[in-house]
Image: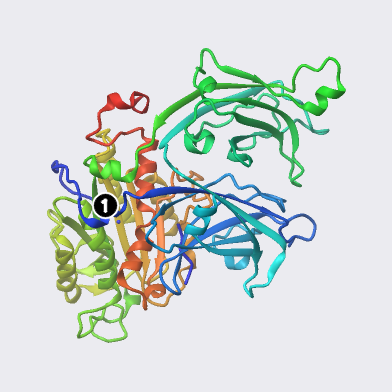
């Protein structure tokens, strides 16, 4: 995720002993998780020829002036009363005041930065307020604190007590045609029954121009669908998508998880879509099509803590930018200049992130590399050189060892260029690939790149990230200095559109970028909290995607997950 608001390769094949981190920090992760569902009504209309295209962004306050982005919902086209399908999942600490800010924007372009989109209003509140109300409805306000027209936001909170998910494969046949030109463009919405009515749990993609659609496989948390009650009613609505937002209802049916779980590819669970208005008008009405559920497989979804305590190691690698644009390290103006107090932004970034992540690696041996410098003895520019100049053993002992290797390396190289990221990303990816071939959830790789400037090999870097998205690997990029880092947006996958030169899409969002300057006056821990916030989710998403259980888990407890 690109944070705009004020990573690791082991070079040997040795097996490491499973390590359980038992510090207070880890214990603090065993907290209640809360799922937040957002909807709005009467939003301001900022589009001239159509309606606003709203999206909700959630920010969390980590200091008096510092907010970081927790996540974003999907964008809903041409809608002033959106019900967002994407949920926010937050750790809830009873003993802390957790300030939240929900911002609603009308999205008119493809950029990640929201400053060029129309602001429709926001709500500041605490997580405690949302949790205690269960369903919090408030007016939206503008930046000047005036009300945003008649716009309101509703946030529903629910404790996650069921960590199972349901994997679905669904198709339909003979759906009603709602279009004069062409055929219907069907999609499905799944609703959970609550005390106050039906709550949207999931929305599928739209299948264009097809009365017999097959939707892509999808996953819905059991908590979101039925709260863990397998006999609770679930409502499914089938619509024909229209660009202007006036989607036509094809039909509705109700079911429950007990019935859905009986589905199989050889014997699917089939449901007639009924359109009540059409049924009342037509005597011979039978249905508006049949939805066929070919698979509804319920499995346990393991948490980050499950994987770490089950023996998964986080392998940490550092990559440092030694390009000429950093300035002469001997002069105080240089980003590589080490002050009499032993400080520069590179060192601060290494300490901040490394001190947190080293606790998840049992041997605490970290490869550290530089790129963009001319190195001895032949002074050829290298984009992948060990800071200790020992290619056979680039490991540093602990974060202290990485810092010491950086200090020793600095006067021995000539800062040069260009700024190429792809060699070091591909370097770590090779070892992540080796780990993935073991078919166990025993290793995950985090590459930290610290850089002062814009990437030179952008196309190659995009391809390297797309390749790495298929591997047990995450990339953290910290930008130091005052350069324009807007090009980093291209590496962010939040809108799901990161592609290689050949058009190949990234499978997961694995890149996290933050500019260091946003944290110059903040406690060191806040930089680490922000850049590492998404790593647990990225670890879980990879191992779930690969259907890999925590190493020390009894597979008999969850046979479906191992298939």
Question: In the image, 215: left or right of 159?
Answer: right
Q: Give the quarter of the image for residue 388.
A: bottom left
Q: Quadrant of the C terminus?
A: top left
**Res 468 seen here:** yes
Coloration of the structure image: rainbow
Q: Residue furthest top?
A: 266
Is residue 21 or residue 267 the one in the foreground?
Answer: 21
Horizontal placement of 209 versus 94: left or right? Answer: right
For the residue pair 432 and 6, the one nearer the viewer reads as 6
For the N terminus, which image quadrant?
A: bottom left
Element at label 1: helix
Residue sitting at 75 percent across and 60 percent down?
45
Image coordinates of residue 101 in percent, x first then y, are 53, 63
User: Which of the 4 quarters of the picture holds residue 306?
Assistant: top left
| Residue 552 versus residue 517 in the image, above or below | above
Image vertical order of residue 284 relative to residue 83, above or below: above
- Residue 191 location (% of width, % of height): 61, 36
In the rendered view, would you say 174 is above or below 540?
above
- Residue 532 in picture, x, y percent from top left: 34, 58
Count of marks overlaid on the render: 1
Residue 42 in picture, x, y percent from top left: 73, 56
Q: Residue at (79%, 31%) from the top-left corner?
A: 178
> Can residue 120 be seen here?
no
Q: Is residue 408 left or right of residue 476?
A: left
Residue indicated by mark 1: 27
- Between 502 and 561, the one lying in front of the other is 561
Q: Residues within 10 Å of mark 1 (few under 14, many from 20)?
A: few
For this view, does 379 lie left or right of residue 503? left
């Amino acid at each position: 995720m690109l944070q705009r608001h004020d990573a690791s390769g082991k070079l040997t094949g040795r097996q490491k002993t499973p390590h359980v981190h038992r510090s207070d920090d880890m214990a603090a992760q065993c907290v209640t998780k809360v799922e937040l569902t957002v909807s709005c009504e009467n939003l301001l209309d900022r589009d001239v020829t159509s309606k606003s295209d709203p999206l909700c962004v959630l920010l969390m306050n980590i200091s008096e002036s510092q907010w970081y982005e927790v996540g974003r919902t999907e964008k809903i086209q041409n809608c002033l009363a959106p019900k967002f399908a994407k949920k926010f999942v937050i750790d809830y600490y009873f003993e802390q005041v957790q300030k939240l800010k929900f911002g609603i924007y009308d999205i008119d372009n493809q950029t990640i930065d929201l400053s060029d989109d129309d602001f429709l209003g926001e709500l500041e509140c605490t997580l405690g307020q949302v949790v205690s109300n269960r369903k919090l409805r408030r007016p939206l306000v503008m930046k000047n604190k005036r009300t945003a027209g008649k716009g309101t936001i509703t946030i529903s909170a629910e404790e996650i007590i069921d960590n199972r998910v349901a994997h679905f494969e669904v198709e339909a046949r003979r759906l009603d045609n709602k279009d004069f030109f062409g055929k219907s463009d069907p999609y499905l919405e799944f609703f959970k029954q609550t005390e106050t009515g039906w709550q949207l749990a999931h929305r599928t993609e739209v299948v264009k121009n097809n009365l017999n659609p097959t939707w892509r496989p999808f996953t819905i948390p059991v908590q979101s669908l039925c709260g863990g009650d397998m006999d609770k009613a679930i409502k499914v609505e089938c619509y024909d998508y229209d660009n202007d937002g006036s989607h036509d209802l094809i039909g509705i049916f109700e079911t429950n998880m007990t019935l859905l779980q009986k589905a199989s590819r050889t014997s699917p669970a089939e449901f007639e879509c009924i359109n009540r208005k059409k049924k009342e008008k037509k005597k011979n009405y039978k249905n508006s099509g049949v939805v066929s559920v070919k698979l509804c497989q319920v499995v346990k979804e393991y948490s980050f803590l499950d994987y770490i305590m089950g023996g998964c190691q986080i392998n940490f690698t550092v990559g440092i930018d030694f390009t000429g644009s950093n300035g002469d390290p001997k002069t105080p103006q240089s980003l590589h200049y080490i002050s009499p107090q032993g400080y520069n932004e590179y060192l601060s970034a290494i300490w901040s992130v490394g001190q947190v992540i080293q606790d998840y690696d049992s041997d605490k041996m970290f490869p550290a590399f530089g790129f963009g410098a001319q190195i001895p003895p032949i002074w050829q520019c290298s984009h992948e050189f060990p800071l200790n100049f020992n290619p056979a053993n680039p490991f540093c002992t602990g974060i202290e060892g990485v810092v010491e290797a950086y200090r020793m390396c600095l006067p021995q190289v000539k800062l040069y260029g260009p700024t190429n990221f792809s060699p070091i990303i591909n370097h770590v990816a090779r070892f992540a690939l080796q780990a993935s071939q073991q078919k166990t959830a025993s290793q995950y790789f985090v590459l930290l790149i610290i850089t002062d400037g814009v990437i030179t090999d952008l196309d190659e870097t995009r391809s390297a990230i797309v390749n790495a998205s298929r591997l047990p690997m995450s990339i953290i990029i910290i930008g130091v200095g005052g350069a324009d880092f807007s090009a980093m947006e291209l590496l962010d996958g939040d809108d799901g559109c990161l592609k290689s030169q050949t058009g190949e899409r990234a499978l997961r969002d694995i890149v996290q970028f933050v500019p260091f300057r946003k944290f110059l006056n903040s406690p060191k821990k806040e930089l680490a909290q922000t850049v590492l916030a998404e790593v647990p989710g990225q670890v879980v998403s990879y191992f779930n995607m690969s259907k890999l259980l925590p190493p020390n888990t009894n597979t008999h407890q969850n046979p479906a997950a191992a298939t």
